Amino acid sequence: MEHSPRGRVRIFVATTPVDFRKGHDGLAAMVQTVLRKDPFTGTVFLFRAKRMDRLKLLYWDGTGLAMAYKRLEDTTFTWSHCPAGDLQSKSAERGRSKME
């Protein structure tokens, strides 16, 4: 049985890098305390590593927290400049190829 996000999905993109040693619980705690969002709603939260070659997606699949991890080998993700500071979130539209 597959439990991936379906239909209309809200996506929040963390604008500053996070410690990639964090797992499900650590990222969920950041979603709650820093972003002031509920990680248990089906919303997808996207985090990036400092080197910009890694992404983590965190979402509630209806049965538990799920996390997807992507590491690029020969390149980095394109990432718009965001001012330094606290971890912030930015809404993203589903299907967009470039993160703004």
Image (spheres, rainbow, N blue to C red):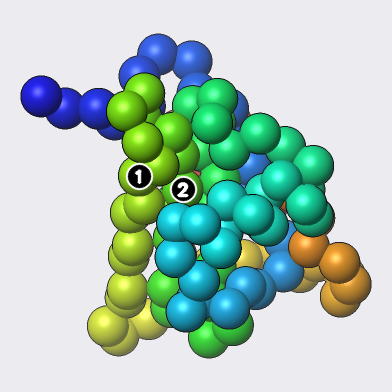
Q: Is residue 66 left or right of residue 8?
A: left
Taking 12 as reference, is 36 left or right? right
The x, y position of residue 15, in whole percent, is: 72, 61
Which circle's residue, 1 or 2, is located before the other in the chain? 2
Q: Residue at x 62, y 73 (%)?
A: 18
- Residue 71 visible at all: yes
The residue located at (33%, 62%) in the rendering is: 69
**Residue 47 can be seen in this image:** no
Tell me the kind of residue under disc 2. Leu
Residue 46 - label: none
* Residue 70 in the image: above or below residue 59: below
Labels 1 & 2 near each other (Cβ < 8 A) = yes
Q: Provide the residue designation for mark 2.
A: 58
In the rendering, which numbered label is found on residue 66? 1
Where is residue 8? Give x, y as percent.
48, 15
Q: Secondary structure at mark 1?
A: strand
